[in-house]
Image (cartoon, grey):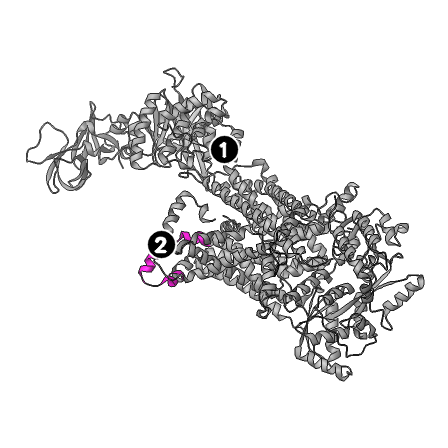
Amino acid sequence: MRKVRVRRNAVAVLAWIATILLVACGGASSSSGSAAANLNDATKKLVDAARAEGALDMNGVFNGGANEAQALIDGFNQRYGLRSSIKYTPYASGPDEVAKLIAERQAGQPPHTDMFLGPTDFIRQLSDAGTVVPLQMPDPTALDSKWLTQSGGVAIPFYTIFPGIAYNTNLVKGTEVPSTYADVLKLNVPLAGTPYAAGYLTLAAPAVWGPEKAIAYATAYARKMAGLGGCGNEAQVASGQYAILAPDCAENFVQILKNKGAPIGYVIPMDAPIIYWFWGTVLRGSAHPNTAQLFINYLATPEAQKIFYKYDLTDLDLLPGSHTGQERKALEAKGYKFYVSDFDFLAANNPQALPAYAKIIQIMTTKRG
Amino acid sequence: MSEDAAGTAVLAVQGLRKSFRTGQHGVAAVDDVSFETWPGELYTLLGPSGCGKTTTLRCIAGLERPDAGRIRIGAKMVTDAGARTFLAPYRRSIGMVFQSYAIWPHMTVFDNVAFPLRVTGVRHAEVRRRVTDVLEVVGLAGLEERLAPQLSGGQQQRTALARALVGRPRLLLLDEPLSNLDARLREAMRNELRSLQRQLGVTAVYVTHDQVEALSLSTRIAVMDRGRIVQEGTPTEVYERPATRYVAGFVGASNFIEGELVTRKNGRARVRTRLGELVVTNHATQPTGASVSIAIRPEQVVLRPHDGTRPSAVENVVVGVVSEAQYLGEAIEYVIEVNGFRVKCRRPAAPAVATGESVHIELPPGACSLVGAR
Amino acid sequence: MTIRGFEAAAERRLRWALEPRIPGPPAGAIPASAGAIAILALIAIAVAISLRTTPLDGTLTLRHYHDLLTRPQALQVLFNTIGFSTVTVIVALAIGIPIAWLVAWTDLPFKPAVYVGMTVGLLMPGFFTAMGWLVLLHPRAGIINVWLGQAFALKPGLFDIISIPGMGFVQGLGLASVVFVMLAIPLRAIDPVLEEAAHTAGAGPWHTLFRITLPLVTPALAAAAILVLVISLAVFDVPAIIGLAGRIFTFSPFVYYEVYPFTGPPDYGFAAAFSAGMLALAILLSLLYTRVLRQARRYEVIGPRSTFRQPRPLGVWRLPAAALVAAYFALALLLPFLTLVWTALLPFLQPPSAIAFSHLSLDNFSSLPWALIQETAINTAVLMISVPTLALLLSISFSWVVLRSQLPGRLAYDYVAFLPQAVPSIVFALSALFFFLFVLPPGLGLYGTVVPIIVVMALVYVSFGTRVTNGAMIQIHRELEDAAAVSGGGRLVLMLRIVLPLMRPALAYSWLWMALLAFRELTVTNMLASRSTGTTVAVVTYSLFAAGNWGEAASLALIMVAVLLPLVAIYLKLAGLGGAISGAVSAVPGR
């Protein structure tokens, strides 16, 4: 009798596991493609190649989460009349991804995803490690081709980021609200930081503050820093766990939170206003190179840009009719002189900025006292 | 060993009662038990498991609280259920040997035995002296540094005994201390225990289910049945003059011959049985006409070959046929059938009597006891 | 337990059991041999990496060990790890001992509920508790801190969970169930007559406690403490989630961040050197553990057992004691659960208030990357099925070699099977990552799949598995096998038709237990995950959290727990409460 009970319960367990499997397998992926837009021959060729691949691995972090990813996927499939099954995998952190990809390249293994979407310097690292391939852009967009060339022909930008100062409106009010990075240090409130010292590479650039000043600032900041978190740390500012995060990762993310009703505000600092872009690049040895090429091409089209603005509250300021472009113009009119962190900027500044950046990470990640 | 003057009971138990609740109804483990123990005697509570002997012992030790009754050790009333007096076991100056020995496994033999002295603050030199002495007495000299798990069963038992004795207790309690030893060791230990107790003169209460132990060791025995003492007496009394059928059957083997008490006169009783009319010189208390049993031990039954002659002046002689003969080494146990009734007889192996032989069996009146009917 | 861990009586029986049997082809030794080679190879890889300048083609060097002793960060991490482990041990003992005492020796009400709660506690993912407490006691915006601040007009920040004591507290809450499980049986096994003997020998309650009871319990206590120490030295979940925010690194997260650093190339050599050091420490502690455990088992029953222990009546303290035990479960399970529910339902984290309640929504659930979750759920399910199966296969083979074969050097197999208990699983993961990434040819296509994870986890669980299979196989009387052998049939038939069926209940419980452990595993899976085909749901939850998306991370954690609890219920029903506790006991390595 005991055996029967054991057997019956073992069946129950396996049934449960099987149920999980069935539910998991149940989800269908792609939507059907309808009539494609008018495409030129080069694009059609790439589309055919992509159709043969039929799938794509997309690693990235979208503020709109899986919904935004799905919108992009649907838009992409619709534009090119494809039914590709595109997988969205949010990654834990950019440096994590970059490290993994470089290690895979060194080991001669195929990369664990097809393309990389991230900020300028990460693309630079990947490019330097030989993990990317030249980018094709057969589907014409309004993006000037100089931006492709600038990256060495491997990447194009698809949206704009303004880093700055995120602050909790309950904890930092009125005259306390800083207007520069320097102001932040004057306040006596808990500060947040990121373990990869987001933004400091640019600050350490000789063209901006230079290594010494950046290190000095980071040291002073680190003394008041009460904790580290990922780039989603703005949410911790909203909750009041920290009062300020500076430099933070993105103004648009703060705006998203603000729209949800969070007590958070945003300032673009006068002493180091920066712009950088998120770029897309195709990885060497990827399983679906053609779809990847096409997808990144797609990111610069008006449909994709609309999706970005809807979910991320940002789009690419370099394109005509861009909302972010207008914001930038308005800020420049107020007197902001933006440092643009593109590939040329990195090429010129990194030799001196990178060692300082490494030191700053060390400072940030070491607990003091 | 005891400091009490001769003539004063070392232990007095009065009206002890304790029940355990199992399920809905209570089981009276101890049901109105009273007895006294005198200086230097080894008083045994004898009975099968469940008769209440261990519970009684634990009440004396203070490990159980009775529902009713009083217990006095020496001059002190240690337990008085009515007056809510209860003295904790560690204040009763007793020594106890447990059935499982309860040797502390993390201590050496020396530490085990020294424990009662150390907790009362005896000084180190004195502890050493007394422990060494008592270890020698029990025969464990040289094993002081052994750890408990390294001891054999017999050695553990001696350690337990040494520990119980080292504090010179007023009363020594032993809870079936030999039951976990194998047969040969048990016999050896029994002898040692007896000589030790006599030599030291320590008053002891001993609990066992083994009647051989009880008969061999005790000064007096209290036979217990279902929570009550049914007979108290010296080993001889209990063995040779069992008061009830239960005692007769428990303390040694017995033949039971049912019958009816016909007359009782001048210390002699006549009982009509299937074997004929038998005479018993036991002090019978049953009324005439009552159903009774005659109890007689197999080794008391006398066997004579039947050669036609009937011994004249001998009472209680019947004729029967040997139906079984079981060889036991030092004796042979015969079963003799008399009128369809089987009588067991045990006698030395030589001369042997063959089965099928016709024999006289004699049941000496002095060896017969009158007990209750079935 | 290893062979060395047996009692004298059992040693006799074992010697008899080890006598050479009917010889036969050692096919049964193949899985064990493969497993042993794998275990030793993984350790060797880590040591090898630590001794070379660059892992693949470097020269021999002691530079990494030099770095270990001179780099301030290394010393800081070591200090953090030891501090964290110490606090964990203290907290776990402080909670586990009283509860074990209450359950074993008193008439505490609702004892079955305590066993259930402890079993659930053993299986709950570490990141679940860590996230919950981080939200509760974050120094400034933690819910409890905010409430305390409001109630007592203090500045919030009274309790800072992002500290060594804070992390130790959270980990100790979780490991208290290990202490409980390690003590429940020894405490019950101590014959109460030993205390009665002390009483009749003149010792009052305090004397008895300090001279008899405590010394008897001490070996079991020591074993529990050492085990908690070994576990917390190697743990990843809690320090990674809570510690990172405060820049407090302990050993396992540190190794991870040396392999996937924030900037610059990974320093495998340094990570491997640190790992080798911790490995040596852990092995020493495990040897000590085995010795202490052997001592504890000696005290269990000496001689024939007499009375059974009457539970000590708590009287008026009955309900307060029950309340205290309930309070522990509230802290360890209920509070984190409620907190995560709260976190999952909010678009951004805020303490409970009227405004907060108006923000409640299921957005976090709907915006989870469901396609990814579906895929990783399959991976998790595959893991849950294959890891226990492979682990038990290896374990049966190990036990067969040690207990039933006549292979020379078979005792060595037992020692090798014991090793994974001592090795921090991050070290295995590091070696395996290296092996599958760099050493194996890419054409095999194993990197980035669940295969490396299955292999590593099965090897990690071999220690536990062999405890169970050793114990079960020892119980099978030799004569049963001899009778089968005489009736005809080779060794394989013997194994399949006699030995395995007799072991079935033990195998079933341990299979299910390992499946449940595999469900929530984060250390190895996080290290080896890259492609979505090789990622599990636990890793996705952690990634969401690490990216700062606490709302989604909480939602996914809750979904994981919702899947876990029914499986735990099935396990409890299968094993029965008594079986659950003894199953859990053998789950704890070494018993």
Q: Earlier in the sequence, mark 2 or mark 1?
A: 2
Residues C103 and B263: in front is C103
Relative height, residue C191 to residue B91 (above, below): below
In the figure, residue A66 lies in which quadrant?
Answer: bottom right
| Both marks 2 and 1 on one chain | yes
Residue B112 percent location from the top left of the image? 44, 30
Q: Is residue C111 visible?
A: no
Q: Tell me the element at label 2.
A: loop
Q: Is residue A366 visible?
A: yes
Q: Amino acid at mark 1?
A: Ile
Residue A328 percent location from the top left of the image? 88, 65
Disc 1 crowd rating (10 Å Cα; few below 14, some 14-19, many 20+) is many
Q: Say the numbered circle drawn on residue C212.
A: 1
Relative height, residue A174 to residue B249 (above, below): below
Q: Tell me the element at label 1.
A: helix
Task: Identify the residue at horizontal 54%, vertical 62% (top origin).
Answer: C385
Tell me which secondary structure the magenta stretch mostly adopts: helix
Q: Amino acid at mark 2?
A: Pro
What's the magenta region? C469-495
C133 vs A188, left or right, is left
Residue receiving disc 2: C20
Residue found at the far bottom of this picture:
A41
Q: Are marks 2 and 1 in contact (CB under 8 Å)?
A: no
In the figure, residue B148 lies in which quadrant?
Answer: top left
Relative height, residue C460 to residue B353 (above, below): below
Residues A198 and B215: in front is A198
In the figure, residue A17 lies in which quadrant?
Answer: bottom right
Report the mark closest to the observer, 2 or 1.
2
